[in-house]
Amino acid sequence: IPFVANTLRFEYSVPNYDNYTANQYQYFLEGFDSDWSSWTKSAEKEYTNLPQGDYKFHVRGKNIYDFVSREAVYSFTILPPWYLSWWAYTFYALVIILGIFIVDRIMRRKIINRERDRAKLREAELIKKQADELEIVDRLVKVINRAENLDELFNSLLEQTFIVIPQGEKAAVF
């Protein structure tokens, strides 16, 4: 029985026609009730909002001579609601796995982009450093090309060295 139809009504009777209005009934829903009901003249019982599970409805009758009939049993199962079914759990698991996969991909992409940006910065710094070094070499080559004798060359190179070497390092060199 689907979960949306979890309200059930049982109607029953005993085949005794001697003062049939005096017949009494007792019922018990195994899996829901804890014990047999008290004897009643009502020939019906309704259960509402039964939770999912397996049930057995037991009923017996008693006539005016206190003869108790054999017990009648009806077995049935209330299925779980759709959101608690095995295929719903499978869907939930797939959604969680897909979510983890997507988050993993996004985080990896962020890390890769961050590392790529750092690499670009390091490359730009290296290129600037190389450009500065090339500029110094270019100045030194120009000094060497302009020099007419060795003394002038030596003095010009010494002068360029003072320009190139930072102030703190000059004290340590000279």
Image: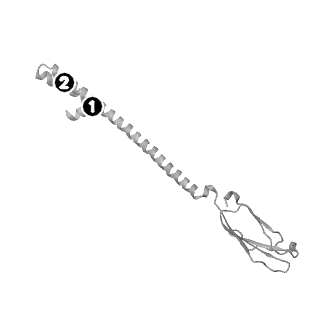
**Mark 1, other Cα within 10 Å: few <14 / some 14–19 / many ≥20:** few
On screen, residue 36 above or below 136: below
Q: Specify the amino acid type for callout 2.
A: Val
On screen, residue 152 above or below 82: above
Q: Give residue 142's position: percent from left, percent from top.
A: 19, 22
* Secondary structure at numbered mark 2: helix
On screen, residue 57 above or below 66: above
Left or right relative to 53: residue 19: right
Task: Specify the label residue 144 is tagged with.
Answer: none
* Secondary structure at numbered mark 1: helix
**Mark 2, other Cα within 10 Å: few <14 / some 14–19 / many ≥20:** few
Q: Specify the amino acid type for callout 1.
A: Gln
Q: Give residue 81's position: percent from left, percent from top.
A: 64, 57
Residue, x 23% and y 32% (percent of image)?
170
Q: Quadrant of residue 168?
A: top left
The residue that label 1 is drawn on is 130
* Front in this rendered view, residue 148 or 90: 90
Q: Give residue 159's position: percent from left, percent from top.
A: 20, 25
The residue that label 2 is drawn on is 141
Q: Quadrant of residue 79?
A: bottom right
Left or right relative to 160: residue 108: right
